[in-house]
Amino acid sequence: MKINYQAKEIYKYAYILIALIATFWFISFFEIYATIAKGIKIPEIGLTIAYKMLNDFWAGLIIGILLFPIYFLITYFNKKIGIISIQVLVVMLIIIQFSLVKYSLTTLLNLGADLLGYSYNDITTTVSSSEKMSVGYFVPYIVFIGLFFAVLKLAKKVFLEQSLIAVSIILLLLFGSMKLVFSKSLESAFQNKLSFLVTDILKYQSEKREMNSYNLDEREDYPFLKPTSETKNVLAPFFNLTEQKPNIVFVIVEGLGAEFVGNNEYGGFTPYLDSLISESLYWENFVSSSGRTFGVLPALLGSLPFGEQGFLELQKIPSHISLISLLKANGYTTSFYTGDKSSFDRKINFLEFNGIDFVIDEDKFGEDYTKTQGNAGGFSWGYPDAEIFRKTLSVLDSKVAPRLDIIMTLTNHEPFEFPSKEIYLAKVDSILNSTNRTSDLADEIKSYSNIFASLLYTDNAIKGFMNEYKKRPDFANTILIITGDHRLIPITQKDKLCRFHVPFLIYSPLLNTHKKMKSISSHFDVTPSVLALLMNNYNFIKLDQVSWISQGLDTAKQFRNIHKIPLMRYKGKINDFIYDDYLYSDGELFKIKENFGTYKVVETDLLKIISDSLKEFKMLNAYTTLKNKIFPESTNIYMNPGIEFSEEELKIISSATKGLTFDQTFQLARKTAFSKNYKKARLLCDYILNEYPNHADARTLKGRTLAWEGKYQEAEIELLNVIKRVPHYYDCYLALLDLYWWSNQDEKSIEIAKKAFENDIENSDVSFKLAKAYQRLNKSTEANKIMDSLLKINPDNVDYKTFKKTLN
């Protein structure tokens, strides 16, 4: 009886497994249909369907094998609960599978170990940007769950227990032989999304263990450290520099791949940038360091290694130097401009470590600027590109020259929303009607019209910025550098290299010639060459050694590559490498053509050489970032490190914050402060600020606790720092007004209240506190005016009426 019982339960389990595999197939059919509906051509669609069905079958079978022990154990004690439990697990897997397919349809990529490289806040921000939440959004999930149960019911009717074994054997033989014959089915494009995610994470963890297994304790050297003189001043022949140090302006364009510029395949939608090419130094075959934005700042401004998940993700930032810190030390005013939150991707942590003077981000635009309209779910990345440039131009005169200005655009990113969108969509149609393109290419562009309209918008925003900048007297002594952070994702990538292929140009009135370069260079090469140009022509603090991972730009006109360029496609894995004129990617070798296309080659000996070279870099990457061996901390006068915690403080933090988010940690810090344990409250605030330097609530609370203890000078510094970072945050003004009241600094109260009004702070408490300061300064007229205004708005406020009487 026991044996018969177990056999019956196995049959039930097999039906669930068949239903799961069938549902995976339905989801794959949906993916193929949705891909075609977007205008993307699928070559050999029959084989694509076969490959996907093959991989879905094996993914479902492996899931079944892995879940069977759980099913067996539960049903041994309670068969009903066992069936329900497995069905719940399977439904969850179907939801995950479909979510991964939706991600892939948006990005044209499978989600893998890069998932581990993002914080919860970053993930929700990114998802909100590309997904429009509504009731209809969840309908497909319900449909596929319903299909699972429908197939389960049908399978029980169609496949009798006697025939189930025969069907299973036939399927195993069929898909087993297909697995052996069709090696192409292993390519990531055909993989089951859930299987790819798990496999990629396992590969990442395996590689991480391998890196950690290297004996790093025996080394004490700085492998990237080299004499400054080794970096050749290759840019000098192209410039006629003046006696005054030039302004350096970086424009980092979101998603700008080289394919969208000049006469390349998707060209015609950046007319202004195209016009600059003939007036600039232009590198046709230039690559970003990474496949997403997280890699651009450390590579472009510091020629830095990646660390485990990108340099910005290193919790303890290693000692290093950068163009920001070096130019600041030599008299430059350094500024960073973006339309989103500088905390995203931990940009602010990197910028502050390098001592950036000014950061303009989403919190500092003010009422005169308009954010990008939110999507259906209400999400907006921040301010569109034209507003970013307008804000930049509005503050340049307040910054002392020479300047280093770093501008990051935002618009060429999901959800591709921007002002006057209909006008730019019409321009896309006009361009398509006036140019000769193949019908397939024209159809593809039309299917992505919102993206190409976005490119036109950004190009026009750059044009507006440049036209205004040219009117400035300091334009004559300015060097502008324009590049993309990576090639935008949602349009089909022709090969594994184009994700990194970005334009790079240097434009300046100081240029004495213009030139196109076919030689390969990367973001890693920019800071070494820019710094060499400046250090060899101006009086800079002597710098004997640098720690760049590359040697500088190659200005050769002909196609060649003198660099070894590691590439991090997404956070967590360095599996792409440019060596000579070859691309090594995920264990395969591709020849790079002069037009920067690629084709697969089989060269076993060379594959081994390149693989070993990449492995060597990975070891150096792990060693230098884990052991703080990029640039000696003892001689680094340029860094601005975060707060260092003692072992005892770390124990307190670890114990207090276990299982808490940063928002929950702030609530704990607040509660702790109200309990008058100010020291611990500040410790918790510092813990938050190490991760989020612009966390206005935490920094304000820290300032308040200092004021409550009578440490007014320290409190003032902290609170003024909040205003510098988040000028439109009202609570820091209230805290400062309290501080000045308690410390009898009423003149400062007037100054800070005026600053609050200038920054559009509309808060009656600010006005009330200002009136009290005026009273104490015997300025009753001013105090009365404020109170009359407040009482008009709040005539029944007891505190206001009581204070008003004291003024008469």
Image (cartoon, rainbow, N blue to C red):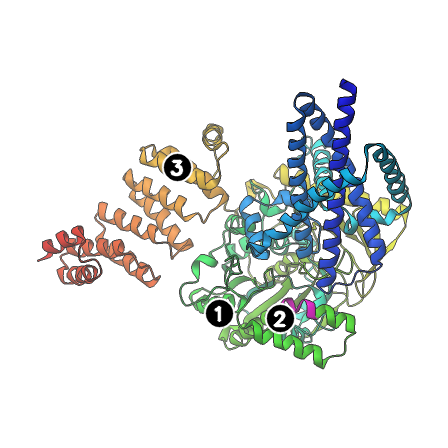
Would you call the spot at circle 2 few (<14 residues within 10 Å), some (14-19), or many (20 or more)?
Answer: many
As shown in the figure, which amino acid type bears the numbered disc 2? Answer: Ala
Quadrant in the rendering for residue 256? bottom right
Would you call the spot at circle 1 few (<14 residues within 10 Å), some (14-19), or many (20 or more)?
Answer: some
x then y, percent, for residue 694: 45, 49
The answer to whether residue 223 shows anywhere in this view is: no
Question: What is the spatial separation of the Cα atoms under label 2 and label 3, in whole angstroms?
Answer: 47 Å
Queried whether the magenta region covers residue 452, the answer comes back as yes
**678 up-or-down from 296: above or below:** above
x then y, percent, for residue 776: 15, 53
Tag shown at residue 281: none
Q: Quadrant of the N terminus?
A: top right
The answer to whether residue 474 shows anywhere in this view is: yes
As shown in the figure, which amino acid type bears the numbered disc 3? Answer: Ala
Queried whether the magenta region covers residue 677, the answer comes back as no
Which residue extends farthest front? 157
| Residue of label 2 | 453
Of the pair 272 and 494, the residue shown nearer to us = 494
Q: Nearer the viewer, mark 2 or mark 3?
A: 2
Q: Earlier in the sequence, mark 2 or mark 3?
A: 2
Of the pair 66 and 125, the residue shown nearer to us = 66
Tag shown at residue 669: 3
Part of the protein shown in magenta: 446-455
Q: Earlier in the sequence, mark 1 or mark 3?
A: 1
Compared across the picture, whether 175 is left or right of 91 comes to right
Tag shown at residue 390: 1
Would you call the spot at circle 3 few (<14 residues within 10 Å), some (14-19), or many (20 or more)?
Answer: many
Local secondary structure at mark 2: helix
